[in-house]
């Protein structure tokens, strides 16, 4: 029987814990494949007392015998990529034998990073809060049909193509008020690009479909989250790719009928890093307490993450857009010990209550809360506290999708599988 592509993706604003879940389930898959985003992502894995943060490399690299594919939808910065390889080498993991890179993936140049910086600086107060990794400008060159791809590294005239794109970027800098210096990064970038040629480049779609035809199962690892999706997120405060399940098809080259499970990852609360609307954001001591307990600081930029209560209208919307078939609830341990927890069940917009998701999440959108009893300590090898079970059931009912994974700590082992979970009546 042909294999399936299951998808793991963020159902909120990113940093839900995708890396952890992918690492937990990776032994059940032949291939782990990233399908979009780039070094704006920071996926944290913790096991055996060690922490690893991955940006471009899929989260299956620590599992022996699992293939890891960087798909065509990903944008790659050779410098970050080689840095990741170096860190993994130092941790005793040689990624080379099991890592494949699609020739169609686009390359992030130093000028893309500089353009990202210039664009954000020009925007001033209205900035997106980009990670400044060059993501937006690289996807602009992709859709503008100017980009450089991994396969170009194998072409004899690569330096000429590189020079032509840089020349275009130099013309672009003229429209910006800010002109970040980038030349000093060029030599390092060219050396890293050269070093990347030592990796195995493939026609990712061809390779993946052959594996599927042989009956191998694939896990597509999303980056960012649904609320940061270019089409369905809180535009313009979004990233520049399709972070949703449909992105797995275009970012890997697989047909929709190949998609199996779609696992939506969410935290028991919400976080957001960067600018943009966040209806349930807490600006008080509770928000600070969640940030502290959850260690909510960006895995890529170190920025403090904004924290707030769980937003069910947004989660329901994410489940709809992605066709989520099961949910994974992360970081329930972070809320342990709170006497009560709040959940946003609807929005009030200009005095009218709605459970739908508005065009703009502007200041007119106010959360409507329900309070639920808090829970005590929760660990993976013991029955969950009744109050936590009730919280999970509340979410399952509101979203209409079962919670099949409950994560109770950052370590690989702190994970509870609820295979038989069903939506309560
Ligand atoms: P990703 O981008 O979706 O992979 O998530 P990040 O790695 O950016 O952020 C998730 C953070 O939460 C990381 O620091 C993880 O180690 C941590 N984490 C994941 N699951 C849990 C959990 O269940 N409990 C706690 N306390 N931390 C968790
Ligand atoms: P992972 O995969 C959280 C946010 C940035 C900014 C906006 C646009 O770790 O969940 P970009 O650099 O893409 O132009 O930034 O998106 N952002 C993320 N937030 N997790 C991420 O990835 C993110 N990647 C981008 O903070 O608001
Ligand atoms: Mg992250």
Image (spheres, grey):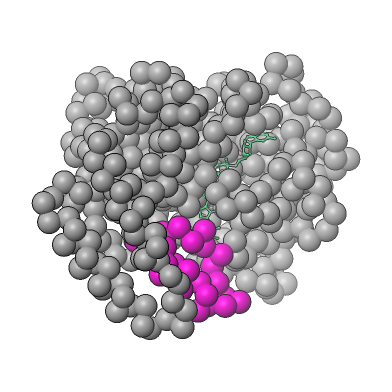
Along the horizontal axis of the image, is 386 left or right of 156?
right
Kindly tell me whether residue 256 is visible in this rendering.
no
SS assignment for the magenta stretch, majority: helix
Residue at 45% x, 57% y: name it. Answer: 133
The C terminus - image quarter: top right
Where residue 59 sits: x, y (%)? 45, 33
| Residue 211 seen | yes
Side of 288 where 327 appears, left or right: left
Q: In this view, does 316 lie to the left or right of 189?
A: right
For the point 60% across and 66% down, which residue is it? 276
Residue at the (39%, 49%) spot, across then down: 79
Position in image of residue 76 (x %, y %): 35, 49
- State yes or no: residue 423 in magenta: no
Quadrant of the image occupied by residue 374: top right
Q: In which quarter of the image is residue 280?
A: bottom right
Residue found at the very far right of the displayed protein: 339
* Residue 114 part of the magenta segment: yes
Where does the image place residue 279, in percent across and percent down from the top left?
68, 62
Who is closer to the viewer here, 55 or 388?
Answer: 55
Quadrant of image for the N terminus:
top left
The span picked out in magenta is 113-138
Q: Place residue 222 in its image quadrant.
A: top left
Q: How many labels does the image show?
A: 0
Residue farthest to the top, as pictured: 381
Relative to 306, residue 378 above or below = above
Percent x, y for residue 392? Answer: 69, 34
Return the residue nearer the eye: 27 or 394.
Answer: 27
Q: Looking at the picture, tell me which residue is in the foreground, 198 or 365.
A: 198
Asked if residue 360 lies left or right of residue 72, the reply is: right
Q: Which residue is drawn at 74% across and 18% down?
A: 383
Q: In this view, does 166 lie above or below 254?
A: below
């Amino acid at each position: 029987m042909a294999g399936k592509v299951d998808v793991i993706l963020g159902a909120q604003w990113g940093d839900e814990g995708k890396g952890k879940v992918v690492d937990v389930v990776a032994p059940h898959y032949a291939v782990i494949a990233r399908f979009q985003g780039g070094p704006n992502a920071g996926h944290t894995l913790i096991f055996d007392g060690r922490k690893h943060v991955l940006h471009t490399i899929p989260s299956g690299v620590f599992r022996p015998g699992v293939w890891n594919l960087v798909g065509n939808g990903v944008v790659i910065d050779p410098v970050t990529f080689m840095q990741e390889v170096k860190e993994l080498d130092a941790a005793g993991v040689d990624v080379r034998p099991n890592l494949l890179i699609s020739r169609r993936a686009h390359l992030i140049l130093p000028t893309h990073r500089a353009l990202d910086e210039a664009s954000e600086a020009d925007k001033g107060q209205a900035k997106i809060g980009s990670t400044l990794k060059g993501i937006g400008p690289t996807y602009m060159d992709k859709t503008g049909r100017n980009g450089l791809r991994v396969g170009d590294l194998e072409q004899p005239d690569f330096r000429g193509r590189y020079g032509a794109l840089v020349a275009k970027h130099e013309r672009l800098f003229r429209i910006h008020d800010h002109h970040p210096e980038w030349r000093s990064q060029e030599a390092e970038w060219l050396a890293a690009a050269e070093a990347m040629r030592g990796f195995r480049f493939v026609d990712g779609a061809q390779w993946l479909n052959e594996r599927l035809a042989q009956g191998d199962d694939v896990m597509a690892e999303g980056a960012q989250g649904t609320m940061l999706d270019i089409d369905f997120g809180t535009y313009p405060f979004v990233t520049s790719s399709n972070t949703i399940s449909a992105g797995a098809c275009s970012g890997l080259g697989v047909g929709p009928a190949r998609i199996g499970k779609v696992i939506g990852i969410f935290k028991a609360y919400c976080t957001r890093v960067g600018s943009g609307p966040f209806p349930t954001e807490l600006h008080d001591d509770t928000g600070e307490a969640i940030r502290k307990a959850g260690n909510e600081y960006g895995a890529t930029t170190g920025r403090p993450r904004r924290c707030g209560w769980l937003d069910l209208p947004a989660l329901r919307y994410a489940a709809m857009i992605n066709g989520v078939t099961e949910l994974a609830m992360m970081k329930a341990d972070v809320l342990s010990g709170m006497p009560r927890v709040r959940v946003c069940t609807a929005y009030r917009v200009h005095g009218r209550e709605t459970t739908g998701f508005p065009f703009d999440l502007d200041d007119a959108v106010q959360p409507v809360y329900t309070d639920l009893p808090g829970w005590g300590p929760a660990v993976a090898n013991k029955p969950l506290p009744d109050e936590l079970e009730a919280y999970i059931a509340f979410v399952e009912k509101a979203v209409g999708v079962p919670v099949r994974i409950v994560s109770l700590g950052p370590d690989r082992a702190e994970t509870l599988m609820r295979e038989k979970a069903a939506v309560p009546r």
